Amino acid sequence: MILADFQACTGIDNIAEAITLLELNNWDLVAAINGVMPQENGILQSEVSQANIYGPHSQAATAEAAVAPPATSSSSSSPPSSSSAFCPVLPSRHIVERQPRMLNFRVEYRQRTVEVVVEEGSAVGEIKHILETELQVPISQMQLKGWKSGDVSDVTVLRSLHLPKNNSLYVLTPDIAPTASTSQNSVLQESLNQNFLLVISHREAQRDYNLNFPGSRTIQEVKRNVSDLTNIPVRHQQWEGWPAAASDDSMTLAASGISYPCHHLSVCRRSSPVNNTEANMFEQCADVHMVSDSEGDDFEDASEFGVDESEMFGMGSSTGCRKAALMPENSENESDALLHFTAEFSTRYGECHPVFFIGTLEAASQEAFYGKARDRKLLAIYLHNDESVLSNVFCSQMMCADSIVAYLSQNFITWAWDVTKEANKARLLTICTRHFGSVVAQTIRTYKTDQFPLLLIVMGKRTSNEVLNVIQGNTTVDELMMRLMGAMEIFSAQQQEDIKDEDEREAREMVKREQDEAYQLSLEADRKKREAQEREQAEQLRLQQIQKEADDEKEAIRLSLEHALPPEPAEEGGEPISKLRIRTPSGEFLVRRFLGSTKLQVLFDFVASKGYPWDDFKLLTTFPRRNITQLDPASSLLEAKLFPQETLFLEAKE
């Protein structure tokens, strides 16, 4: 029912193309219709909701409005009629309840295999979180490898990678030492990251190729690349030098047992009677392909001579000359499909042809539009169709002309696709809708088979990409060159504006960077000055604290000595009294009476209690000059001849 409704609403009669578009949108009818119809005519969610209110008949009217031209104002206000409905829409519960697309990942780590199933809208980091739980490996030490587009970050959304439903990945943990049981597998994982130099000798051409491949590359991929270089299809290649273990072409180079870092191989074309017959048939067909542009008017009259057009251009029945398809049907990887396209194109029309970009259309757009303004180029999308009588002439005489090849190689990024198979055509329309909008896909759909091949010239702009020109197959070399040069003039004008804007932006950014650097230097100088001041203040505080502690300690000692002094005796008593006058460095006099039997230590303690410790000061007599502090502290004043009275003075020790 969904398929019938989709075909009725979009007018797509090809069932395979319709099924492909519906599968890409998880059989969501509204999303699929909006994907192929222009936005201004697409079915909006609000229209679907309104259709659900009126009932099934109004739903059909809403779907009809999505593809029919807008009605006049008088008719738009009338209620929907069941007689005008031709595209019924499913109830709203089938449209709103959209099931997310699930992706399956088979992840290998050493001797373990983990199956992970996540939604297409998930990020790569979510897979790592699941693997962290299953493998007990920290995310920080985990490297997830095996992506077709190269290494990706943890925040990359899986939907942006355009992955198939089933995928194979592997985990590397270079920071985690392997156990004895996993050492062999660890060596294999390390080999996957190593680069192998393959020295391949083409015996027939007597030429050697030095090719670098990562260890994760399969033998089949190597053979395909060699096919592009030697013009020998993979099925006709005869190899020497592969190890005995390399029996499966799906095996990686790391597991094949080849020598590291360099391994020597040789290749030649396998000779057989069948192949010689095919080569002769192809040469006969090549004679038919080389038809001059000026004879294009004779195509319509070919039937008058009993010659079928398809036979004239090498597309006859099974008894005639058969050509291999430029692109395999339902290829999961766009890069592999384009490698096959390039190899087969070279086989048919020779090595002199434009350099076709190997990668997705998104990658080609990135290469052409999103680099530096001076490095940007136009994007040329070549669409081939073997069922068109113009394909062979266009390829052999236009696409392979030296002037066209040189001009395209210098000014364009050329991306190609074969729309001969309906599945490949449907896939192309989906890709164009995703990158350029539904208008481009609708434009390609309007061209008939006999108008192919097409060459779309696309220019990148700030907000969106614009198709400057669509060149059909019924053209001449001079006209093709003129149209390419016209597109280049438009692009050059836009490029000069972009270069000017980019230079101005870079100049502003440079000034801003210089200002930021000067500001940072100023902040750094202020910070150092502030830190020096803080260190100086801290040092002063530390010295003050040390001095305060020393003063406090001296004061505590002085007080303890002062309290420990014996009381001053009276002037008149039974024992002999010694009266001493001590002159301080400041000129003051300290006067005190002592018993004649008092020890010199008591005199020293008295002087120290007044702030003059005997460690720092000398106590001297006037005449004769004697240093009392050098006498025995245990001797008495009488023994030191400081009786009955004496004048002493304090002097700081040197």
Image (cartoon, helix red, strand yellow):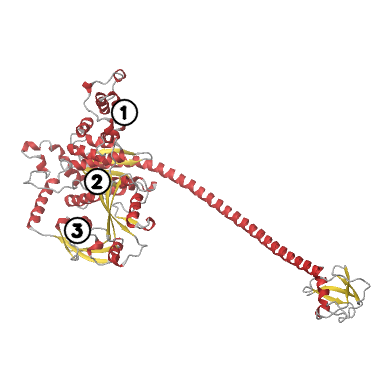
**Mark 2 or 1, nearer chain start:** 1
Side (left or right) of 91 relative to 622? left
Given contact means CB atoms under 8 Å apart, are the residues at marks 1 and 3 in contact?
Answer: no
Residue denoted by label 3:
249
Mark 3, other Cα within 10 Å: few <14 / some 14–19 / many ≥20: some
Q: Amino acid at mark 1?
A: Ser
Please, what secondary structure does the residue beneath circle 3 have? loop
Measure the alpha-carbon separation of dots 1 and 3: 53 Å
Q: Position of residue 346 (x, y in %)?
A: 19, 51
Q: Which residue occupies the foreground of this view, 597 or 214?
A: 597
- From this viewpoint, which residue is outermost toward the right? 572
Looking at the picture, which amino acid does disc 2 mark? Ala
Tell whether 539 sits left or right of 341: right
Look at the image and tell me whether residue 475 can be seen: no
Report which residue position mark 1 lands on.
49
Which image quadrant is residue 50 in? top left
Q: Earlier in the sequence, mark 1 or mark 3?
A: 1
- Residue at the (29%, 64%) spot, across then down: 182
95 and 644: which is toward the camera: 644
Relative vertical location of residue 53 with respect to residue 260 in this rendering, above or below: above
Q: Position of residue 14 (x, y in %)?
A: 18, 36
Residue 397 visible to an observer of this rendering:
yes
Residue 247 at what x, y percent from top left?
17, 62
Looking at the image, how many numbered discs can be counted on the residues? 3
Which label was assigned to residue 416?
2
**Furthest residue to the bottom?**
639
Q: Judge by depth and name the residue closer to the eye, 97 or 296.
A: 97
Q: Amino acid at mark 3?
A: Asp
Q: In what element is the residue under mark 1?
A: helix
